[in-house]
Amino acid sequence: MCGRFTLSTPSEMLAELFELEGGPPGLPPRYNIAPSQPVAVVRRPVADGPRRLHLLRWGLIPAWAKDPAIGARMINARSETVADKPAFRAALRKRRCLVPADGFFEWATEGARKQPYLFRLRDGRPFAFAGLWEAWHAPTGDMVETCALLTTEANDVVRPVHPRMPVILTPDHYDLWLDPTVDQTAPLLPLLVPLDPATMLGYRVSPRVNSPANDDEGCVEAV
């Protein structure tokens, strides 16, 4: 699974990489993004329309859910079963998004403790997780938009630490993933594979990242 990630890339670079309507989004740097918090997502509501950035709560609440607490268990969706799971299959066909990031954390069991590791691209550039989103309507009439990250089997860089990793899409796949006219899973599922390990690196970081209350550069420094 993926339970924490980072996004500290300057807004100007994000606007250019994701071709965002309206220019730089003005996001503060984040070094320890945790479930239930707002996360930036990129969507394209209309085919051939502009890409737009919105803040959604991390932890998908299916439209049919009676209790929004289910979102705490829906931060990830397994790519191997996402097309069949009732919580995710409609979103895969109709509500896909990119989740910008520049790093993600996984934990390895080392003796009696869990040691966190940070994984990034070797060139330091930001990237995009494959995401799904949903709109849940509360009994009060309020609408809550939420999201989940797709996961897949780990590549050779991540596997020594954890057997799973988030799906990282390459830029040449952004348009297909965001295209609202694509409502069949056949062209989408081949994208949900581990990223080329040659493009990635990972290193140990401080256990400070274990607490969501810590959200500063100390969370991403190598130890």
Image: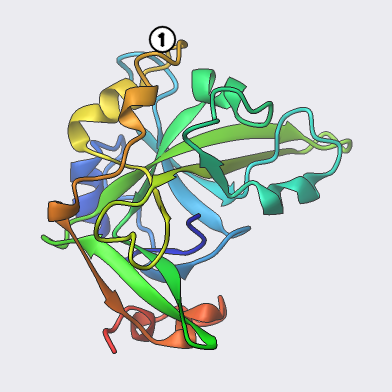
| Residue 188: x %, y % from top left | 37, 21
Q: Is residue 206 depicted above or below 190 in this figure?
A: below
Residue shown at the point (79%, 51%) measured from the top left: 69
Residue shown at the point (52%, 86%) measured from the top left: 113
Q: Is residue 30 rendered to the left or right of residue 171?
A: right
Q: Is residue 138 rendered to the left or right of residue 207?
A: right
Q: Is residue 82 depicted above or below 70 in this figure?
A: above
Residue 221 lies in quadrant: bottom left
Q: Is residue 198 rendered to the left or right of residue 203?
A: left
| Residue 92: x %, y % from top left | 51, 24
Q: Residue furthest front?
A: 111
Residue 9 in sight here: no
Residue shown at the point (78%, 45%) measured from the top left: 68
Residue shown at the point (11%, 60%) measured from the top left: 123
| Three-letter code, disc 1 | Thr
User: Disc 1 designates what residue?
Assistant: 181
Secondary structure beneath dot 1 equals loop
Residue in the foreground of this view, choosing between 33 and 70: 70
